[in-house]
Image (spheres, helix red, strand yellow):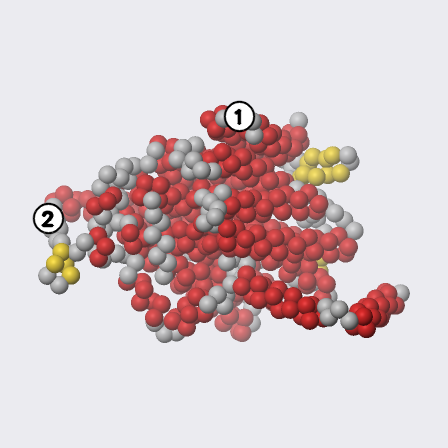
Amino acid sequence: MLNNYLFLLVVIPIIATIINLFVPKIIKKVITLASVIWSLVLSIKVFSASALSFSLFGLTLFQTDVLSKFILLFINILSTIILIYCLKNVNKKYEGNFFLLFTLTVSFCNGVALSSNMIAFIIFWGLSGLLIYLYDLLNAPKSAESARKSFIIIGTSDVLLLFGLIVMYVLTQNSTLFITKIALTNVITYIAFFCLLLASFAKAGAFPMHTWVPDFAKDAPIESVALLPAALDKLLGIYLLARIMNSLFIYPFVIRAIVMILGALTIIIAVMMALIQHNGRKLLGYHAVSQVGYMVLGLGTGTPIGIIGGLFHMINHAIYKSSLFLSFGSVEKRTGTPELDKLGGLAKKMPLTFIAALIGALSISGVPPFNGFFSKWMVYQGVLVTASQQGRIWQIVLNVCFVLAIFGSALTLASFIKFLHSTFLGKLPKKYEAVKEISFNNWFANLLLGALCIIFGVFVFAIPVKWFLLPIIGAGTIKTLLLGFYSSKIILYFFAASILLGIIIYVVFKKIRFDNEYVGTYPTTDEHSATGVEFYNEISSMKPFNKIYEWANKKYFDIYKWGTVFSLWLGDVFHKLHSGLLHTYAIWTLAGLVVVTIILLSAI
């Protein structure tokens, strides 16, 4: 019976989608909620059970182990919470289609987590990628260009995944995933490795396959941004990366070092871009990329503490980044703008949304005792342990990665000080004086995610580490893996004491003076008041950052641009070769026959 749960986790949401094609919107919401909750219940049962499998026509399609059950559970937990947020205030223009796509998202993502057969994995992986394009199109024509960009980058990564898995099948003659390790001994095995690596990077949003994420975050419905690039796509991309680094290949240390370097570059490049954003969606989008770097860095270490840190940060990020997108989405729904320089002072109007955003900001910035601190701390230790086991040159390289990761965390905090000040603090524009808190389901879902940030931070050893992470690496305790002492309760006490002290000082010395802003001798208007974004503009003019930002604005780091340039160049080459002259075609035909003959003779 339990084995059939694997099949039901994929089929139930699809059945819900088919029914939703023929019912009114209110019924769609009920059916969607029922199917997602049912999937959550089934995922909990699957997580609690031993390894399961489901076969069809004698072919094993779905199978679970500790890692896949872990991913499956959080796919359904996050989907349920985000769906609660979506039950009200989704844009009426695309509300009906949104709920159709939502159930398909749960089905396809469950399929990726459960698939043990290469063909099934490719199908569900490709379908989950197609949903990114469809969600983006909900906001067309505004989102047409970002939809095209995400379709091309994700589609290209699907081709890379297909090629990599075909090579694996040819080498092993086995279509079952995650069983036989392949040693990187020749060019073809290296090509297969990097094809799969780039596929995982595109799904998770890591450098250099990351550029679709900020554009999708800016243009797509905010609920879909919280669901996919902030949460489920991160789980699937890092899930594949964890398989690549620990199950599929045997590789030399230089490969691990390359992955760690790419992780560090992802952190610093994306956070530098986030600092100068005036659009709140794009700021959060770049941070959705930057945080992937910590996951890649942790998994790249190959150490138990680093792997746990990378996987834990994957879950932490999905929780707090979904909360941040949804919090800002609530602000945008009430104010009608995502531009930070047009916001301010909304904490008094939307206090519950502010609390959720504050918790998310502290978590992503790595402030203890919230969950983001501990996962980053474990990633740092994984890097240090790996560096200590290598020669002098590699120690220098990995320590640079370590410094970049810490510096990236500091810049994240600076960026979210800007985000919170610009959105919730400062002066409230007069046009927002009538703004009210968002609906119950919206702030309730946000506070649920905030509660998880606190629980996973304060009870880090008792819940996430013990229940979810240690079983993945087969370890009985984490205390022997840590390089130092950490007590979330002690930090919580200090945190609570500092807040209490602040309240006491406020009550005893309640003297607050409010001053008006002036330009010259005239009071400022809303259009000319100081905002929280202007200070950070100076960063883009500092040397050597100014050159980096100049290159970024010219899209030198955008793989989509270079792919477009290469495609146009290749098309021009073929256009010139397509001369219409018979003797030219004859020469190319002869050359092709020679190449094919050489290949066949070498095979013999």
Q: Which residue is drawn at 68% across and 63% down?
A: 190
Residue at 37%, 54% (x, y): give it: 279
Whether residue 245 can be seen here? no
Residue 506 position within the rendered picture, expressed as x and y whole percent measured from the top left: 15, 46
Amino acid marked by disc 2 = Lys
Q: In which quarter of the image is residue 81?
A: top left
Give the foreground label among 1 and 2.
1
Of the two numbered discs 1 and 2 on the same chain, state the one appearing first in sequence: 1
Up the image or down, 431 lies above or below 4; here it is: below
Q: Residue at x 31, y 62 (%)?
A: 536
Residue 83 % position (x, y): 46, 35
Q: Identify the disc placed on residue 441.
A: none
Image vertical order of residue 41 relative to residue 459, above or below: above
Amino acid type assigned to the residue bearing label 1 in the image: Val
Which of these two is toward me, 106 or 458? 106
Question: Dot 2: few (<14), some (14–19), or many (≥20) neighbours within 10 Å?
Answer: few
Where, quadrant-wise, is the C terminus in this rendering? bottom right
Could you say where residue 292 lies in the image, as x and y percent from the top left?
49, 55
Location of residue 307 in the rendering, given as x and y in whole percent from the top left corner? 54, 53
| Front-lying residue, 573 or 266 | 573
Q: Kindly identify the residue that appears in the image at 76 percent across and 49 percent down.
A: 174
All told, the count of numbered labels is 2
Up-down relation of residue 309 to residue 456 (above or below): below
**Residue neighbourhood size for the residue with mark 1, other residues' Cα within 10 Å, grouped as few (<14), some (14–19), many (≥20):** few
Instruction: Name the secondary structure under disc 2.
Output: loop
Quadrant of image for the N terminus: top right
Q: How far apart are marks 1 and 2 (CA)?
A: 59 Å
Q: Name the residue under label 2.
A: 511
Q: Is residue 29 left or right of residue 536?
A: right
Where is mark 1, residue-wise?
A: 23
